[in-house]
Image (spheres, helix red, strand yellow):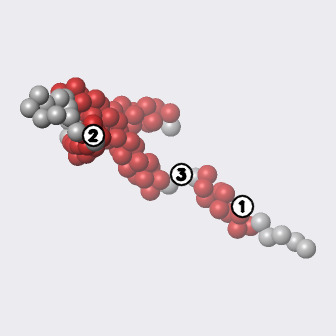
Amino acid sequence: MKVDTSVALQTYQNSKTPKVEDYKNDEAKLKEQTDAFEALILKTMLSTAIKNEDPLYPKEAGSDIYHSMYLDTLSESLSGSFGYSELLLGYLKEQQAGKR
């Protein structure tokens, strides 16, 4: 019994040669990750700026969880607009271009 490996070899050869679409896809993934990093920075800054301490109202059982969820949502919606993501993306693209 003979096994046909031509399709597997062709697929392997095609996967080794990078295409323009692959670089665009990589750039989109990289932008997504730099935005996520910016969201992490913003959440740290927002957690320092917006404290969950209100002397007028007593602290409820789930208030810390809701406050954390609020900061997550706020930092994710603000990420990509402060410039940290673009700065990091530009730096990483320069590093990637230097390795090619």
Residue at horizontal 40 percent and vertical 34 percent from the top: 92
> Mark 1 packing: few (<14 Cα in 10 Å), some, or many (20+)?
few
Q: Amino acid at mark 3?
A: Pro
Q: Which residue is mark 1?
A: 9
Could you tell me residue 54's position as x and y percent? 13, 30
Which label is found at residue 27? Answer: none
Kindly indicate the quadrant of the structure image that contains residue 34: top left
- The quadrant the N terminus occupies is bottom right
Residue position for label 3 = 18
Residue 91 visible, this orientation: yes
Is 93 in front, or is 44?
A: 44
Mark on residue 61? 2
Quarter holding residue 10 = bottom right
Distance CA(mark 3)–CA(mark 2): 53 Å
Indicate which disc, 3 or 1, sits on the residue closer to the N terminus: 1
Q: Nearest the camera: 67 or 47?
A: 67
Q: Amino acid at mark 1?
A: Leu
Type of amino acid at the residue the image marks with label 2: Ala
Q: Outermost residue, bottom direction?
A: 1
Mark 3 residue element: loop
Helix, strand or loop at mark 1: helix
Earlier along the polypeptide chain: callout 3 or callout 2?
Answer: 3
